[in-house]
Image (tube, rainbow, N blue to C red):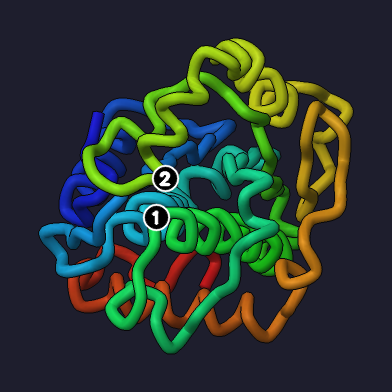
Amino acid sequence: MADLSSQSQVRILATEFKGKYDRLDVLVNNAGVLIGHRTVTEDGLETTFAVNHLAYFQLTALLSDSLAETAPSRVVNVASIAHERGRLRFDDLQGEKRYGAVRAYAQSKLANIVFTYELARRLSGTGVTANCLDPGAIKTGLGKSRGGLAPRYWRLRQPFLAPEAKGAETPIYLASTAEVTEMSGGYWAERQLRSSSKRSYDAGDAKRLWDVSEDLLASKEGDQNPEGPNG
C-alpha cells in the first residue's frame, strides 16, 4: 500500500516489493483522481498529474529491473476514453495558469497513453511489453473529493455505471492471456485493440513528456533510477 501522490511512498513501495519478491511478471498501474479544485502534493506537484501519470512513470521506472529480469513480462496502464478530450499543455502541465477538474483529468489520461507508447518503443526487444486501456464507465470512488461541479456530476452518475468487475475484464485480459504475450504499444477497450486519439500518437510529445517526467523525479529520487524505465 502507498499514497501514490507521494514520490517517497512510491519509492518505499518499490523497495518493499523487491525485498519481498524475486520476480515481477505483470505490473498494472491503475490510478485515477478527479479533483474539483487545484491542490498540490507534498512534492509541490498538481495532484491529478502527480497521481494519475507521474506515479505510473515512477513506479515503472523503479521496478523496470525486476520486469526485465522476469521477462517475458508486462506493463498494463489503465487510462480512460476521457483522454480524447485531453491535450498535453507543456506550458501549464501543473494547471497553475488555468485549472479545471475535467481538463486536468483528461490530460493525465492522455499522458497514460502517450507514456505507454513511448515505453513500448523503449522496451522493444527486451521481452517486456507495455499496453494501455480504457476500462469503461465503471462505478468507482472517482469524484469523491469535495468541491467543483465535475466530481459532483460523476458522483451522481454512479448508480448508472457498470460494476467494478466489468472494469477489471480488460486489465485482466492484458495481464494474463497468452494471446497478447508479444503484443506491445496498444490501446485496448473491451478486450479489443482500438485506436486512441490523434494527439496520443505524437512521438515528439511522447519524448517531451518522458523528459519532463524524468526532470520532475530526478531531484527527489537521487540514485533511485530517475531516468525512467530503460531510459
Residue 150's tag is 2
Q: Nearer the viewer, residue 102 or 61?
A: 102
In the image, residue 97 sits, relative to residue 6, either above or below, namely below
Residue 126's image quarter? bottom right
- Residue 133: x percent and y percent? 69, 41
- Secondary structure at badge 2 equals helix
- Secondary structure at badge 1 equals helix
Q: Residue furthest left?
A: 42
Identify the residue shown where x is 74% and y is 78%: 202
Identify the residue shown where x is 66% and y is 68%: 118
User: Mark 1 or mark 2, which is nearer the start of the sequence?
Assistant: 1
Circle 1 crowding by C-alpha within 10 Å: few under 14, some 14–19, many from 20: many
In the image, residue 12 sits, relative to residue 170, either above or below, namely below
What residue is disc 1 on?
A: 101
Q: Are marks 2 and 1 in contact (CB under 8 Å)?
A: yes
Residue 46's image quarter? bottom left
Identify the residue shown where x is 18% and y is 62%: 40
